Image (tube, rainbow, N blue to C red):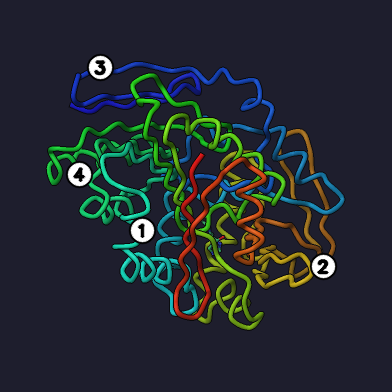
Amino acid sequence: MLQFDDKDNGIAVAHPDRGVIALVRETSRRAQARRATDAVQLRNRQPGAGSWNNREELLEGLNAPRAWISCKYFYDSLGSQLFDAITHLPEYYPTRTEAAIFARQGGNIARAIGTGRTLIDLGAGNCEKAASLFETLDPARYVAVDISAAYLESALVRLRQRYPGIGMIGLGMDMSAGLVLPDTVPEAGRLFFYPGSSIGNFTPADAAGFLSDLRLQCREQGGLLIGVDLIKDKAILDAAYDDALGVTAAFNLNVLNNVNAALGSDFDVRDWRHCGSFNQGLSRAEMHVETRMQVDVRWPGGARRFEAGERIHTENSYKYSVEEFDALLRCAGFRNITSWTDLRNWFALFYATA
Ligand code: AVI
């Protein structure tokens, strides 16, 4: 039976084939040094002690002249459901466009990658995206990484019943703090899978660092399959980050509730409004929350006045050209880069080897 635990910020590892459960502690100095600021956070369905306990980081952001909140605070259980709802919106094209590339290019992707790999799913969530590749890629084993160990546990129990021939390992960890794979994950033949353009939630510099770390973990015959959102018309991107129904607004404003839960602050969501648009100069969609009036926010040991119209920056979502992302992969040490795009050139999938 699968069991996960995330005590002491460690990584709980369950190996269903051998029934072994081990706790691997996060020891990498680099991992501990890297602070999640702009960086993407895994979809966190249950606020994880290891990911939401960074009071210092929260205070640094709230006290900054241009206030900011790390985007990891989007993902409580409600935030994760709101994100799922976003992926169904007509304006939010990335999820369905990426799926269309897989549908159209599945044969070519499978030929480039080959079969029998160890598929390592970064930010696995309900594991469905990776599972849709099982038929074509026929992985020898599947390693699902997500910040919510409990969510992974139930997803993997279901998946094992569907694919009893594939060995499965679940890692409940906050990947933004660095990826540490246990010894149970064989070194040869690793295929990292990072879909959904989550890489866009890193700054390009942090993305390069993250990709370099992945490349170091690739070892023999390792590779990376990654989804990247491409630069496109501003109107399309503006709509994707500020939809007509207001689902993205709810997703963004919910961050204030989550900060209240983590910090004990007294943000009132009704005092704030959502701002989401594409910043062409910086090639990124930005989300902010903006005050409707002058607001005083208090938390244990501190407070801040926000003037009317003042903003808190909550997320960046960088968009790349195929050439720019190719260069980023090269810079991280990847080689033999192949990419596939959809018919409109809105989204790209890259496969690169170490
Ligand atoms: C998770 N991430 C790739 C999404 C994005 O597009 O940057 C999060 C999101 N933010 C607003 N809508 C969706």
Residue 109 numbered mark, or none: 1
For residue 191, above or below residue 100:
above
Q: Is the C-beta separation of discs 1 and 2 under 8 Å?
A: no
In the rendered image, residue 20, in percent from the top left (x then y), is placed at 25, 17
Circle 1 — which element? helix
The type of residue carrying mark 2 is Ala
Q: Which numbered disc, 2 or 4, marks the residue closer to the eye?
A: 4
In the rendered image, residue 338, in percent from the top left (x then y), is placed at 49, 57
Q: Which numbered disc, 1 or 2, marks the residue closer to the eye?
A: 1
Please tell me which residue is depicted at 38% across the width and 39% down the height of the picture.
120
Q: Mark 3 points at which residue?
A: 20
Q: Which numbered disc, 1 or 3, marks the residue closer to the eye?
A: 1
Q: Spatial distance from mark 2 to mark 4, Cα to Cα?
A: 50 Å
Q: Is the C-beta separation of discs 1 and 3 under 8 Å?
A: no
Question: Mark 2 or 4 closer to N-term?
Answer: 4
Please tell me which residue is depicted at 47% across the width and 40% down the height of the picture.
47
Which image quarter has ligand 1?
bottom right
